Amino acid sequence: MNAPFASPEVSIRPLTVRAADLADPQECARVEAFASGNGGSVFHRPAWLLAVERGTGNAARALLAERGGQIAGYLPLSEIHSPLFGRVLASSGFAVEGGILACDPAAARILAKGAQELAERLSCTTVELRGGPVPDGWELRRESHCGFVAPLAADDAAQLLAIPRKQRAEVRRGLGHAMKVTIGRAESDRAAHYAVYAQSVRNLGTPVFPRSLFDAVMDALDADILTVWREGEPLSSVLSLYHAGAVMPYWGGGIAAARHWRANDVMYYALMNHARARGCDRFDFGRSKTGSGAYHFKRNWGFEPQPLSYGVWTAPGHARRDADPTSAKHAARIALWKKLPLPVANRLGPLIARGLG
């Protein structure tokens, strides 16, 4: 059957744009329904924006394009403030997706214009769109990051065989160490995850996000934590998000000993099997900087990189925002951060990382 055409009365109604009232549960429900019906990611959900606000203090903003009282487009935004990296409206904050969702190009254009005007009113010099249509006149970044998504196999044995031979051998070595795997949402799971994650990102030279962000996301969304243990010590841990049939291992890492025991390899294999048991049919390995170590690690698992399109608007007269940890500008800072004692890095890191967005 052919899809029905919009009536002339609807098609000629003017578009308007306004701020969404995220404090109104009914408004949030309307936005949730629109995002779900238009292929939105977990990062389009008002629950994500509000969790980021609770966990980092960065204000949740959102714009709605409407036509005849119906939502025609939606743009989730986090207002990020940082003395090091400047002020930015990020769509979405602390996310790898979350750009404009629109029923038509006109709705996308009015949302982009609305975002620029909102940024100027809030003294934000930059707007970042992570995915979705990129408006004319905005900087388009198409090669900086790639996403990695693949279907899950039919069962545990098939999942292991789906992993390329060399990587499969690493998983088998890890499984041979008979490490313990736990999955949960309790305080013990959260504490183990944060301890592992904080050490992992310190070793990479990156400030750790505040634990309050992880707690807020866990409390607001469908998420859990999988941890790999050996002799009572957590070696690897990942906080994963579940949305629309896909699992996304979002915040994960391992301590220095994890590599020796292949704990990370066991962790991702165990997560694939756990997600299938939960009813997922896809494994979303998230995004990675093109050519980075994480990029090649995911390719070793058999995932094919898909270039992502990001849009950036910079206010006239201002320099382009640079919060890229791989840029030459931050190389010295990263080298210094790797040398910090872990307690110092854990104390200072959240103060800096809450402004990364």
Image (cartoon, rainbow, N blue to C red):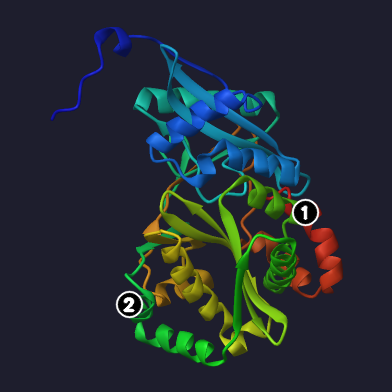
Q: Residue at the location (55% across, 35% down)?
A: 76
Coordinates of residue 333 in the picture (x, y in percent): 75, 65
Q: Is residue 122 above or below residue 8?
A: below
Nearer to us: label 2 or label 1: 2
Give the residue type at disc 2.
Ala
Coordinates of residue 70 in the picture (x, y in percent): 42, 18
Coordinates of residue 38 in the picture (x, y in percent): 38, 35
Q: Which mark is residue 138?
A: none
The reply, left or right, for residue 92 in relation to residue 165 is right
Say what secondary structure mark 2 lies in. helix
Tell me the crowding category of disc 2: few under 14, some 14 to 19, or many 20 or more residues within 10 angstroms, Cα based: few
Q: Residue at the location (62% across, 39% down)?
A: 49
The reply to whether residue 357 is in sight is no
Task: Say which residue label 2 marks.
Answer: 158
Q: Residue at the location (58% across, 29% down)?
A: 62
Q: Is residue 240 above or below residue 25?
A: below
Say what secondary structure mark 1 lies in. helix
Tell me the crowding category of disc 1: few under 14, some 14 to 19, or many 20 or more residues within 10 angstroms, Cα based: some
**Residue closest to the eye, 90 or 148:** 148
Task: Say which residue label 1 marks.
Answer: 352
The quarter of the rendered structure image containing the N terminus is top left
Image marks 2 and 1: residues in contact by CB distance under 8 Å:
no
Coordinates of residue 28 in the picture (x, y in percent): 56, 29
